[in-house]
């Protein structure tokens, strides 16, 4: 008869995100995970297999959480420019409210792991495509209803906004000066016309 788990897998994944996010994939040892997750080594292996599998599940959990929050912002009854501003502000607020200045977990994984790990690379590419598509749909809608000028290509603007978010996520590891980010957000919104 199989034993029942005496821990909440979703809570363990949240803790795993925090550990990998703070230390990075390569610097996180199995002992760090055992200590930080509060489960036995055998439970860790039985449930997740190995460190890599746990890392992939942690990335997926992080992506799912952030995607849900992005959807809420996009579906708000706001003007297109306000939706874009709110998306950028959401990213900045999350980064600046982090006392450890960890940056974005997905960007960190992209820089540290993706070059040498196809599975991580594929996850990040899919996440990036979804984020770009989110911006594209919002911008296209704004062009269709006249809130944003249509002389610029909606896909090109979406890629610019996506790149702006990536840049914000990287520089947040080295500065917490809100004025820097406000300048970036204001300039990005001006691109919309």
Image (cartoon, rainbow, N blue to C red):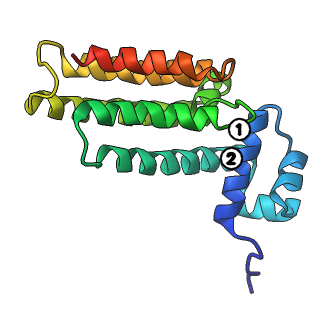
Q: Secondary structure at mark 1?
A: helix
Q: Which quadrant: the N terminus?
A: bottom right
Contact, CB < 8 Å: mark 2 with mark 1? yes
Q: Looking at the picture, how far across and down is residue 71, in whole percent?
A: 36, 48
Say which residue appears at 30% left-offset and 15% top-offset.
190
* Residue under the image location 87 percent in, 46 percent down: 32
Query: For mark 2, does the 10 Å Cα neighbourhood hold few (<14), some (14 to 19), or many (20 or more) residues?
Result: many
Q: Position of residue 189 (x, y in %)?
A: 32, 21
Does residue 66 appear anywhere in the picture? yes
Q: CA distance from mark 2 to mark 1?
A: 6 Å
Which part of the image, by quadrant, shows the C terminus? top left
Q: Quadrant of residue 142?
A: top left
- Please give the residue where the numbered disc 2 appears in the rendered image: 17
* Residue at the extreme bottom: 1
Q: Quadrant of residue 138?
A: top left
Front in this rendered view, residue 171 or 9 = 171
Residue highlighted by disc 1:
21
Q: Would you call the spot at circle 1 few (<14 residues within 10 Å), some (14-19), or many (20 or more)?
A: many
Foreground pick, 107 / 177: 177
The correct choice, above or below, for 116 with respect to 5 in the image is above
Q: Is residue 9 above or below residue 133?
A: below
Secondary structure beneath dot 2 equals: helix
Q: Residue 97 appears at what percent x and percent y?
A: 64, 37
């Amino acid at each position: 008869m199989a034993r029942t788990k005496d821990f909440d897998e979703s809570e363990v994944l949240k803790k795993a995100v925090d550990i990998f996010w703070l230390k990075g994939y390569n610097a996180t040892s199995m002992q760090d995970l055992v200590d930080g997750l509060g489960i036995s080594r055998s439970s860790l292996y039985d449930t997740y297999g190995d460190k890599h599998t746990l890392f992939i599940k942690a990335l997926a959990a992080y992506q799912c959480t952030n995607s849900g929050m992005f959807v809420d912002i996009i579906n708000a009854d706001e003007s297109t420019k306000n939706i874009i501003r709110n998306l950028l502000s959401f990213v900045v607020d999350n980064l600046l409210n982090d006392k450890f200045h960890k940056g974005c977990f997905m960007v960190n994984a992209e820089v540290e792991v993706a070059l040498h790990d196809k599975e991580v690379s594929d996850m990040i590419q899919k996440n990036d495509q979804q984020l770009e598509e989110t911006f594209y749909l919002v911008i296209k809608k704004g062009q269709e209803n006249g809130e944003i000028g249509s002389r610029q290509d909606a896909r090109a603007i979406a890629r610019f906004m996506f790149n702006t978010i990536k840049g914000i996520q990287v520089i947040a590891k080295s500065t917490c000066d809100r004025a820097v980010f406000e300048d970036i957000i204001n300039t990005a919104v001006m691109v919309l016309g």
